[in-house]
Image: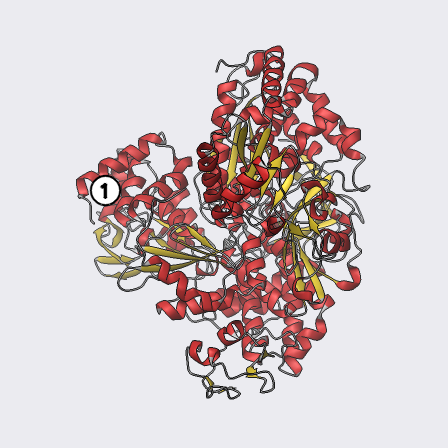
Amino acid sequence: MKRLSSLAELEKLRKKIVSKQKREKITIVTSVGTCGLARGAGEVADAIVKELKRNNLQNEVSLRTTGCHGFCEIEPIVVIYPEGILYQKVQAEDVKEIIFETVLKKKILEKFLYTDPLTGEKIAYEKEIPFYKKQYRLLLNNNHLIDPYKIEDYIALGGYSALGKALFKMKPEEIIDWVKRSGLRGRGGGGFPTGRKWESTRRAEGSLKYIICNGDEGDPGAFMDRSIMEGEPHSVLEGMIIGAYAISFGRAQAQGYIYVRHEYPLAVKNLTQAITQAKEYGFLGENILGSGFSFDIKINRGGGAFVCGESSALMRSLEGKAGEPRAKYVHATDKGLWDQPTNLNNVETWACVPEIINRGPEWFASIGTEGSKGTKVFSLVGKVNNTGLVEVPMGTKLREIVFDIGGGIRGGKKFKAIQTGGPSGGVIPEQLIDLPVDFDALTEVGSMMGSGGLIVMDENDCMVDVAQYFVKFLEEESCGKCVPCREGLRRMREIFERITSAKGTEQDLVLLEELGEAMKLGSLCGLGQTAPNPVLSTLKYFREEYEAHIREKKCPAGVCIELISYSIDPKKCTGCMLCAKNCPTGAAQGEKKKPHKIDKKLCIKCGICYDVCKFDAVKRG
Amino acid sequence: MKREKEMDKRELEQILERYNRSQGQIIAILHEIQDLERYLPEDDLRFVAEKLNMPAPQIYHIATFYKAFSLKPKGRHICNVCMGTACHVRGAPLVLEELERKLGIKAGDTTPDMEYSITTVNCLGACALGPIMVVDGKYYGQMIPSKVKSVLEQTQKPIKGKKK
Amino acid sequence: MSEIKIKIDGREVTAKKGEYVLEVARREGFEIPTLCHNEQVSQEGRCRLCVVEVRWKEGGHSRVVTSCLYPVDEGLIVETGSEKVMLVRRMVLELLLARNPEAEKVKELAQEYGITQSRFGADTEFGKCILCGLCVRACREVVGVEALGFYMRGVLKKVGPAFAEPSSVCIGCGACAFVCPTGHIILEEKGAVRKIWGRSFEMEKCAKCGRYFAPKYQLEWISSKTGVPYQQLAICTDCK
């Protein structure tokens, strides 16, 4: 493959690839992102290759392995084009039948079809599935059309045309102006206007500028960036190259870094491969497409530290130091990585850039709300039916996301709250579920957009336990540099331990609030400053739950172990002895065919009897 | 199986060369060493620090700051339990407790016979499958305490050709 | 360096660009407490005691920042004792009082802010170390030996020599003990031997007055770094 050295050559290549792809008649697509692989998608893909070979179909039918399609709940997914027939939860042993019946005989196999939980209807076609239909999949749509190891797939869809336009038809200042006018705000949690950041970095003094992609996605429950890095890595690269050009060309040299968290090995692999191919084709390296602009990108892996998602800690980590943040009174755009002007943006933010250049800032600004433009990818997880990645225009109501797209609460339980913004965010209770997803609207109620994790909770989730979870998480992840965060989180955890073990007092709530205020004002970085949010927001909307723990020594949701007990309902118990057989301490006791009992003195509340009982006879509360 | 001390140092030098002896690449360098040795021996750390002109307290800080690194040898089978929010609300703590009970050790520790280590991770990003446990690189989703026993039994079986 | 005007607690003062709020304030007689600050080393903003409230416009949006690291510029408005500032300072002191109940310096400062007791349980395992990092910075930036560092993170964070073992590069100069604000670092001297961070150092006698004044190893190290002959260095500062 000869390096492309002009825009004309790129367009010629694109036409060639597209015409070649048109000739392929049938394509089977299966997603092999981390989720799919964990459920056997790798074996499914292998089985498809084998079966196609066995039937001598390699020339008429092709297999495309892609990143996440976003509907994690029904993985492994197999989609057959051109019809777009979608089969869910496919396993390797199903492949033979699928190839024989559907690919060869065009027969749809009902047993593999997705069933809409609200209507009971079986749906055969991908585009008719409500989960997908109700989204606006700007960034995620291409995931099922692209094999992340094949740059040609990306080019065929128009990839790198934005880069061509930026390099040859626009000036750096114009590109920055477009990004400003688009209203794009940082997708990592900060929500800072991207165009302004680029402009500050361009204006800064310095002959070497750093362009960083923050792929440290540490918010537990968030995996949007993972699926973009795994499934469409070139969109991130293209965004970064355009950004680097806009920020540095004519003023400085530029060097790019992508910092990927340690827990995403597949993302590291796919990005590395993408960079290698981009270099081969001439989209990275010296004199890109003959424009005179040179830029390279390196990949750095994290070491397992949530705090390294904080931009100044990330930069220290890139410098080969421990990830301790530093004061940002002097902006990183002036003095960042190695004290050089540095522009850091999140994965999703970079991925938004190519389309803004292709379709123009007005198009992007026409989607969303006044203060929050464009679409946002959310990871919808927890007690919801349709777990997965949801992309919607900013301003969409939370209710729509949870119920229309998410299919409502699993197991028919009652919605209690949705947690947004990860450990920096707060809970949104039922009375506020018509709030739009918008940077400012969410901040106003004591939460925040964050990176996009949406954790759905039901009546069996204890808000005190949820707050305690985040406090413990942050205590472990705090770098320990400053007193308010390090000492404050530890003391908050002690208070929660008291509250959840029947030793809490009213004074504890007062102390939590005071600690919270001091941490918000006095902590060195965003981790400590936003750490009180889960505590303060659960206190705001679910104070009565805290008070039940303190005054009545009860956990109404039935979660806090020291405040609950397990018992067996004699009316439901059939005496099958399954609980007794599995009980690790012999607390569950009884004779065959007679109602069993749990000896509370021996019970360690492991919950195994609750798991194994087939008659719903074990009660927890 | 213990490798010869001589070979250790040559292999370490090779790793350092591959990263251009750059201090900025220290995390990647330590990942490679840990992948080979299953932990970061003090010897290796002191050697690397010397070769990179890095003061020993600095490398010690880095090796103890990042959770991915261990200064103590890990067991042959690593059981990694996800403690992310989504897994938490779906019952991950009870799964962890059962695992700790079955192996007789707490999270972060290794069994005396060096067979099993329990580690926790704050979100693997595969939340639809939660609660998740990763054992010997294999993902086990939808975990409940009563499934822990059968997952551990899988580790006793010989490993087939590993897929990456 | 250009002269600029800023306001501190309502009073207009002059400062130079490139200075930080703390040094300007102290020069002008305003009292701001610190624990992790020392003029001889770089600042890191670890203790948060020196916080002040700043704004750039009267009645405008304000921020609570550490004065040791906040650069001054024309028109800056500073409050050294606002409600928010006091809230942070008091909480920091209350937290430190619980963490290091034996540290007299912490008790003194806490008393100044009206805190005699902490609502948090007293720790016993941290001694007087408040993790200010002054010892680390002194050893690295002033002495140039870098025998000390932080290790672990979060609540497990500690300070000490590499691998928590006696350091082979330590020269026994005692700069760390000198700069430690709480007296946590123990420098023991018994006649001809000095003990610090788990190592013993043989002391050298001053060629003039005969008292033990510095470790032999430290003088050897200085000699090798500077080229000054050992004999010239073996004279204590009083006799020089």
- The residue singled out by tag 1 in the image is C220
Give the camera-side residue of C196 and A201.
Answer: A201
Q: Which image quadrant: the C terminus of chain B?
A: top left
Residue C162, compared with residue A621, is above or below; it is above
Q: x%, y% of residue A568?
A: 56, 84
B134 relative to A311 in the view: left or right? left
Q: x%, y% of residue A287?
A: 54, 14
- Please report the residue visible at 56 percent of the width from the left and 81 percent of the height from the top: A565
A291 relative to B66 in the view: left or right? right
Report which quarter residue A70 is drawn in.
top right
A519 relative to A308 in the view: left or right? right
Residue at the front extreme, as displayed: A105
Give the camera-side residue of A165 and C73.
Answer: A165
Q: x%, y% of residue A239?
A: 62, 29
Give the camera-side residue of A37 and A55.
Answer: A55
Q: Secondary structure at mark 1?
A: helix
* Residue C31 makes an appearance in the image: no
A208 relative to A427 in the view: left or right? left
